[in-house]
Each structure stands twice: as structure tokens, then as C-alpha cells.
Amino acid sequence: MAQYLVLIYGDPTYEAGDDDTVMKGHMKFGEDHGAKIAGGHALQPVSTATSVRPDGAGFSVTDGPFLETKEALGGYYLIEAADLDEAISISKDIPMPVGGVEIRPVVVFD
Amino acid sequence: MPIDGSTVLEDAHRREWAAVLAATVRVTRDLDLAEECVQDAFEKALLTWGDAPPANPGAWLTTAARNRALDLRRREATLRTKLPLLVMDEQDPQGPFPDDRLRLLFTCCHPAIAPDAQVALALRLLCGLSTAEVARAFLVSEPTMAARITRAKKKIAHARIPYRVPATEDLPGRLDAVLAAIHLLFTTGHSAPVGDQLVRHDLVGRALDLTQMLRTLLPGPEVLGLEALIVLTDARRATRVDDDGRLLLLEHQDRARWDREQIERGRALVKAALTADPGRYALQAAIAAVHAEAPSYEETDWREIVGLYDLLARRWPSPVVRLNRAVAVGMVAGPQAGLDSLSALSEEPTLATYSYLAVARAHFLQELGRSAEARAAYEEALLLTENTVERRFLSERLSDLEAADEGYGNERGDPDHRPERGVPVGGAEEAAAEAHGPSDEQRTEDDPQAT
């Protein structure tokens, strides 16, 4: 069993509660895959994001997400799956009216 | 007469590599380690077979490689690999897919791996090509290819891409990815995007090997369709360039030299592949079959070809399919109709760097006697082509046009003048099977199952 971080990318103007069907979709996802979900949260809109990058002497702190894309990171799940195929299969049940998800295996340090 | 051990060994390398490696991966659960063991087994064979190779070379090699793997595994503490072990089902391979080669193929062609890396992995792991050979096939440096293959192997291990034939509900989509990888290998060989040779027979042969292997392991209409497409397109191999290495279009190829035996085999495959709801490779193979059956270019059943492209475009509406359809329309309804069909494609971003669009436009303009515009279109195509043979073809068309213009002293040329040498309809028409260039985007775009 491995852990995968599933990053949900979608409409940057979307705010939690805007669309009831999405909310219901997440509730259903939680019920269907409860045993496989190790964590997860919705994020405040991308307009609240701050990026910190080293700039040689110190750090530069800028307003905005790390990567500018048409879709914005809106939330995440941490899921448990046996392999990538299972992680993909579970992720397909996440509501994503626009955008999509990125699946990242979580490193295990022995 | 003594049996030549080295010939048997070469033959075994080509035929058995995939099976030996796939069986060894089951023991090592590590691709690099398995490759090393198989390599050792072949080296041992080279030293010991001599004039008396074993009756069943594949079984001998598998045993040798697996023993080597078991041996290494016993000393696992010192030889532990850096990568996590491959995810695989513990029980012995039984059920509907007992052959490990199929697992290896689905692992290499997992959609989570970039298409060019899928093909590189398949050549390396299933065809047994060395990294240097794979690098040569793609005309990149060996370190570049080594890095690409290493990256893909790391992705398999770290993301836990399983060594498994996908579940029934995922199988159609995953099979599409495997077929697309083999098709990409074939198109790279059939019309090399860059380099001095138009056709790389070695790659076409490998694509055919993989398709035939897939047919034995997992027969189905689309597998037959892809095999038919490769067989029928490759049947024209002897005639695609002339004795001086010049590109010859479908129109000017000596049809008597097409491989009849291969065409018959291809036609039988098409027949089996064309179901009530034909797939994309079956349809493309059917188009290739119409060409193969035509006694001449003019007597080709172009209406049938337009109809087949319509079917193809309905479900897989790629710009390349629309381009090929436009060319066929021109053959049915004349150059103006062809040009009109092409004009709808000029805004298509994926075709912006696709030389066949400019070539097809040049052809129709030339037919209409609009030679200044035709020249401009050939010049545009030249800018977009990196294959030496194709560049030479285009340069010659261009100088023919210039010579004709000077001869007639007329910028627009003589509308009745028929150019002596070829017009490149064949080039665009052949793109039906080729479609390199936009093929990478296309396969993801067109694949509704892409995950």
C-alpha cells in the first residue's frame, strides 16, 4: 500500500459552496472511499496564495501561486492505494467539473 | 552440417528476449536487475552453446536468467537496488493471461509514461535493443536516450505502475495506448521524421514483431487492424524511393513491385478486423487496402476512400484525417474542390508545422495553373521538412515549376500543362498511415480513454 497526494485543479474563481453538486460530489466521494482517504482539504481561492522563493541573499515573497496556470490548485486528498492504477481509478470519482487532478506518489523514508 | 550456435543465438535474441526478460522480472521485481540477468544469460549462451545449441533455446535462456536472478536475490543485502520493487500479484501467473510478456508490454505502455518513452522502453525491454540502438532509432544521443529510459523506469517504480494486465473495464483504453505506442514506432520507421533515410526497415520490422506478439497473446479486431495497416503499408516498401533514393509518390510507384503476398495477407487481416463498428486502425488499413487493390492511381476507388475517411473522421476527427480526406476529395471532385477542403484546415494549429498540408495545397494550386502560389506553398513545405529524401523531392518539384514558368514565359503557367514528374498527392495520402508530427498530440487528443 502506498500513499498518493491527489491535487485537484479547477476553476480559479470557484469558491467552496458555489456549486452544490460539487459539494455533494465530495460528500459522496468521502462515503465511497472513506477507508482509502488519509486526509484532504479544500483550499482558499488562489487569490490568497503566496509564493516564497530563495533569491540568493534571502527569499523573495510574492503574491500568487507558484505556477501560473489556467486552472488553480483548489484542494487535495491524501489517499491510500496499492498501485498507480488503483490511485487513478479512485481519482476518477473526485468531482472535477473543469480542470482535473494531479497524482503524486508520496515518498516513504525508511 | 553443424548447427551454427551464433545464428541460433541471434535468432533467439530476436524471438525470445521479451519472454525471457518478462519471466525474469517476475523473480527480480526490478527491471534493471532483470535486464542484467538476461544479458548474463545470453553471454553464458554465447560461451557455452558452441556448435550444440539446446533444443529449446528460450527455455534454456529463461532458466539461466532466472537462476542468475535467484542467485543475486540470495545476496540481496549487498545488491539491493535503489528503486522500490515492482508492484505485482503474488500468485503464479494463471487465469486468462499466463504470459508475462503481456504484463511487460502493458507496463511499458502505461499512459502515465510519455509516449516517446513508452516506445523507447518497448524497444529496450521487449525487443532487446541496446540503449545505443534505441538512441540511433530516434536520432538522439546515447546519454539523452539513457536518461529518458532511466526516468521512465524510475516512474514505474516510484509511482507503482503495476506489472499486471489491466482489469477488464480498463482493458480497451489501455490496449489503445499499447497500440498507439506500436503505431508510433511503425510511423517513425515508415517515414523517418529526420535523417538521410526515408524508411527505417529495422523499426518497421520491430513494430510488426510486437503486433504479431500482441495478436498471439490478446487477439482482437484492433490488434488485427494495426497489423493489417503495417503489413499493407509496408508492402509498398520497395517502390517508395527510386534507384537514386528519390521519393516516389503513390502515383508514380511501380505497382508491379508491390509485395503481392504481403498485400494478400494484409487484405485477409483487414477482413477479419472490419467489424460492425470498425476501429481506427481497421479503417486506416481498409484505406491502405483500397490503394493496394487499385490497378493504377487514377483507377483508385477515391469515393470509397472519401467514405472511409468520413467514417474515420466521425469518431476520430483529427486534423490529419481531415487533411487526407481533403486530398481524396480533390481526386474525386477536382483540384478546386480539394483546395476548398484544404482551406478549412489552414487555421488548424496542430497542422501549422505539418509539411503535408503545404504540399497538398501546392499540388492543387499547380493543377489549377496557379504556379506562383504553388511555388510559395512548396517553399513553405521545404521549411517544415527535415527528412533529406523528402526535402530533395520538394526541391525538385520547385525547380520543375520554375523551369516550366521560364519555358512558358508566363507567371501563371499554362493551365493545360501537366508537370512531367510527380505531384505530391501521394505524400499527403500516405500520411494516413504516417501522421508523424502531430501524432503525439493526436493520440492523447483522440483517445477518449486517456487516463
Image (cartoon, coloured by chain):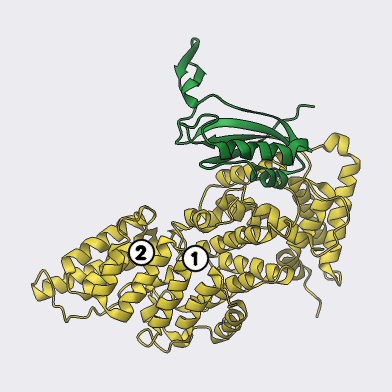
Chain colours: A green, B yellow
Q: Is residue B157 left or right of residue B242?
A: right
Quick one: which residue is furthest to the front in this view? A20
Q: Which circle's residue, 1 or 2, is located before the other in the chain?
A: 1
Most foreground residue, B373 or A20: A20
Q: Looking at the picture, how far across and down is residue B234, in whole percent?
A: 53, 75
Which residue is located at x 18 percent, y 69 percent? B371
Helix, strand or loop under label 2: helix
Q: Which residue is mark 1?
A: B315
State whether residue B100 is above or below residue B85: below
> Is residue B126 at least partly visible in the picture?
yes
Mark 1 is on which residue type? Arg
For residue B133, above or below residue A89: below
In this rendered view, identify the residue nearer to me: B229 or B279. Answer: B279
The image position of residue B77, as x and y in percent, is 87, 34
- Closest to the camera, between mark 1 and mark 2, is 1
Q: Which one is in front, B232 or B61? A: B232
Label 1 to label 2: alpha-carbon separation: 22 Å
Q: Is residue B126 left or right of residue B325?
A: right
Q: Three-letter amino acid code at disc 2?
A: Tyr
Residue B236: in sight, yes or no?
Answer: no
Q: Which residue is mark 2?
A: B356
Q: In percent of the image, x 61 and y 45: which residue is there?
A: B146
Q: Quadrant of residue B318?
A: bottom left
Asked if A7 appears above or below B310 in the picture, the reply is above
Q: Quadrant of the N terminus of chain B?
A: bottom right
Report the residue that reaches farthest toward the top.
Answer: A57
